[in-house]
Amino acid sequence: MIDRHIQSHLQTLLGHFPCVALTGVRQCGKTTLLNTLGAEWQHFDMENSADRQQLLADPDLFFRLHTGKVVVDEAQLAPPLFAALRVAIDRDRSRKGRFVLSGSSSPELVKQISESLAGRMARLEMAPLSLSEAWQLPPSPLYPMLASGAPLAQIHAAAVARLTVHQVRDYWFQGGYPEPWLSGDDAFRSLWQRHYIDAYLLRDIGALFPTLNRDRFRQFITLLSQHSGNILNNADMARTLGVSEPTVRDWLSIAHDTFLWRHVPAWDRSAAKQAVKHPKGFLRDSGLLHRLLRIPDVDMLITHPVVGKSWEGMVVETLLRGFENAGMDVTPFHYRTRSGAEVDLILEGAFGPSKLLPVEIKLTPQSDRRALRTLADFVNVHDCPLGLVINNDERPRWLDERILAIPAAAL
């Protein structure tokens, strides 16, 4: 059993809302987390035919008989429950923490939450294990410090490495899905990832989008893995796959909405006229990325052409999961000019609601100050309190008055 950092925020939301929807990619640990809520909670799984029949036979009667402390797992498989749940909530709107819905994201789930339960529920996204969760460490103190705009000296003091370089490397290569981590067996991890990809693509996405050509979509995901960390050119991808650009856009939306792909839009509020407006993105789990790219071990990863982009994607996900688990709302962007100057990640909402936190990500232990000129310029132009460089150093170091390099092992 691995403690999940998001559990505290889930309890906070249950104290304020009648219902919470917990969404996330399959096998990230949603059901396991919900089983820790307590014996007073009744659980109904919509993939279980008996549970589904019991609820769908008469949804209104079901919620009159089960007035609170109810978990409905894989709720997207039972659309009629949403209207009945709205009535049940409105029957006693002041009661909090009564219902939890969980499930993988789908158009039906998002639509029903937006239309039937708006204002009545909070939505919480759960991801696979973060770096610190995988090694069973408590949450890093950096995330609340950054979100609250703590003094820079305090942030520097808190940015100490909590893991070894080897632990960070192992997590980077393996990814964050709980079951392979709990096993600790390399052969099982490889088999699990292979069968997970097949089940995810062929069953889950195929069920959510019945008209989807599953074989072509799998080809698209394989191609997408080769572009992880790059600015996307939909026209080039469409030509490679022999499909239309609208089809590529639809497939990108499916990959993002089902938590396989992280869409990172371009920062479009810069004064720079030469800023690139195209988005980029990452395959969200580094272990699945390495599986799709057929990278069998760390030694090959270190020498592979995608090594830098793979590292960047892992750090981006680690940061975003850290803020999400702490209940802090941040929005990611990237920044790049046509001349090639770039900042890997811009976080809006970190370091205060109206502030930006630019982040440069480096695989090497040390960072060349000359290579950080774009980061320094961005900090100055946008009056950012702080710019971060995340690397593989052993300890935090000030690179400039407002640029702090911290080890990835501190996250």
Image (tube, rainbow, N blue to C red):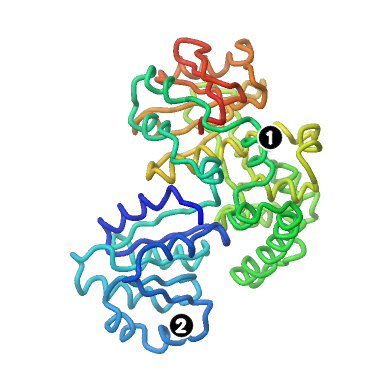
* Amino acid type for the residue under numbered disc 1: Lys
Q: Which is nearer the N-term, disc 1 or disc 2?
A: 2
Foreground: 233 or 76? 76
Image coordinates of residue 70 in percent, x first then y, are 35, 72
Residue 140 visible within the image: yes
Foreground: 335 or 404? 404
Identify the element where label 2 is drawn. helix
Asked whether the beta carbons under mark 1 and mark 2 sit within 8 Å of each other, the answer is: no
Foreground: 376 or 232? 376
Q: Which residue is mark 2?
A: 51
The part of the image, by quadrant, that contains residue 43 is bottom left
Image coordinates of residue 150 in percent, x first then y, are 34, 25
Side of 362 relative to 382 (left or right): right
Compared to residue 180, the image places residue 378 above or below, namely above
Q: CA distance from mark 1 to mark 2?
A: 44 Å
Spot the residue most to the bottom.
Answer: 57
Disc number placed over residue 309 in the picture, else none: 1
